[in-house]
Amino acid sequence: MAEARHNSTAAVRTFEAMLDASPDAFLAIDAAGTIDFANAAASRLFGPDPRLLAGRDYRTLLAAASRPEMDRILRHLLERPDDPPAPREVYWIHADGTRFSAEVAGSLLAAPGREDAFDDGGPAPSRYLLSVRGTSHRQANADLREVLSLLTATLESTADGILVMGSDGRVAGYNDQFLTMWDIPQELMDGDSDDPVMRRVMGQMADPEAFLSRLAEVQGDPVAETHDVLEFRDGRTVERYSRPQRAGDTIVGRVWSFRDVTPRRQAQQQAHQAMLDLAAQAEKLRVMAFQDPLTGLANRAVFNDALAESLKEPRLKSVDVLLLDLDDFKEVNDILGHQAGDDMLIEVSRRLRGCVPTADVVARLGGDEFVVLLTACPNVEDIATCILRCLHVPVIISGQVLRPSLSLGLASRGLEDVGPSELLRQADIAMYAAKAAGKNRFLRFQPDMMTALLQRTDLESGLQFAVPNREITVEFQPIVSHRMGQVVQFEALARWDRDGGRVPPSDFIPPAERSGLIREIGLEVMVQGMQQLAPWLGEDPARSLAVNVSGVQLQEHDFAATVLRLAQEYGVAARQLVMEVTESVFFDADCNVIRQLSTLRDAGARVALDDFGTGYSSLGRLQDLPVDTVKIDKTFVSMVRTGSERLPILSAMINMAHSLGLTVTGEGIETPVQADYLTSLGCDSLQGYLFSRPEPAARLPGVLGRAEQALGALNAR
């Protein structure tokens, strides 16, 4: 029992010591209100020594108006010990008689020093412990609470993760965002060791060794303020800031701030990429503004500017413009396709650049038209010759061997003032003159070329009225069969008589095709041909009429129907009609061409492939073409001079055609030797001046007589 009493006394003393250490005043009172104990803070609050307070009725310390309130507090504690009331403000009396306000809170407490105080493990219900706190601290505490509340709200609302480490290396504080950012469970932070937290942090670093190295540097320099960037394995980017935590002049720890800048970094990267893309687009637009996109040469704008600048320089410096255009380039596009055409242009531009490395400008004006600007060049004509020679070398395009051909016009600044557009126009006129002179050549501009241009313009203008003015007529050239010894077919050929003269077909057919007037002219030739030859055709159903048909005509959706309607109208059987076309019509993108020819063939008409051998297709393509006859071009026939030549190309053409079930006609027969040579190779029919030149229908009886006479002479050889 003595030992228990000793232990109890020791516990009470410990309890009293703890109360003495508190800054709040504590009064232990019994049920009657007598003060059993007062701590040191009570003397500071009420005035007298704590020993003088013991034994006094605590009510003597209360203002009279506050005594009922204290009675209610004590009654509440006695009746509901487990639910103590909130602190109340009451008025007290200081030892000097002054009245002051203080907050009071209370709880039940066993009477100190009594053995029964801890019976059943709980305090005696008749004892109270009052805590009294003066309200002078309120404003300071309110300010402190406001600051702490603001600080707490700031820390928890910020997007940054905050970690405070003490100088002893232990965690002094952190916010929820820190735990979320590093995916650290709360229980790890509450643990006794920092190792699990560090392992979790290191496991998220893209470069753990660099992370540890930087951490060691910072720990070695307590006063340093740092900023670096952490790369996480999951792709996040976090900026890390740190600065020393000071208490006055003493460093007590370090504050770490972590900010997830992944969205900002991504936005910066996107913005950077957007700037790069924008710069690339700007560069592309700049290049497009000055460069031809297909060939990489300068464009028209660059050439025009350079030409204008060069003409401003002194006349002692020559200025030459070389304008060149590929011959028959449209056929490359039509037969091999536009990609092949682009490949051809790229190759031409490469060669052209190599021919004139010292040129001021090499440009593509558009389509298949190129231009070269040379200044202070002493040998411009030699360069023009070099260009023709270099570009005329064969090239393989889409598996086909092609030989580019070009017409080049040269214009130079002379004594007279001339503007940039006029000098380019002169080169253009010279280029067309070179094309008209036979192509694959160059011509220097001469004043009389302007006259030729005006004539060509006048011709194209007059062509508009050729049919309405009845200027288009038809002449017929016979096609003979040496085996039958007679004329079996006439080819209708368009003629244009204008102002008392005759315009050659080579002059008016190309512009007619370019302008689309060939539709009107072709229809007129067909009408006149059927009308004038109907009597001859009616005498023998084996006879036929051949009419040249342009690809432009075949693009008309009702072309076949129109031909069959005209044949019926003039009493000509469809099987007596032969449509002569060139190879290029079969490679037109418009499938209507094939449909129109197929309709005519289904009705009995035949299709002849004119000028065979001069196009880009091979003999093997014959089996894919809807034709009945091939006409060997006169350029091959002209190779026969003595009859002793070995010309395997001719025999190959004829044999290939026969093997495909086609008939063969030789064009341009001018001598008996040529006729005999083709006949010996098995050519089915012949056409040329040997038998007759083209003649109007009124002279057909004479034409038939001369043709048959020539045939008789051949058979007699």
Image (cartoon, rainbow, N blue to C red):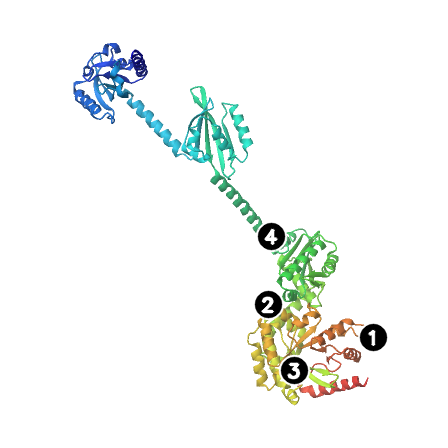
Q: SS of the residue at dot 4? A: helix
Judged by depth in the image, the label closer to the viewer, 3 or 1, is: 1
Quadrant, the N terminus: top left
Nearest the camera: 603 or 211?
211
N-term mark: 4 or 1 = 4
Contact (CB < 8 A) between labels 4 and 3? no
Q: SS of the residue at dot 1? A: loop
Is 696 placed left or right of 254 in the picture? right
**Residue at left 45%, top 35%?**
181
Q: Which mark is residue 290?
A: 4
N-term mark: 4 or 2 = 4
Distance Cα–Cα, label 3 vs label 1: 34 Å
Judged by depth in the image, the label closer to the viewer, 2 or 3, is: 2
What kind of residue is marked 1?
Ser
Distance Cα–Cα, label 4 vs label 1: 59 Å
**Residue at left 58%, top 85%?**
568
Q: Which residue is mark 1?
A: 644
Q: Which residue is mark 3?
A: 545
What kind of residue is marked 2?
Ala
Q: Which mark is residue 589?
A: 2
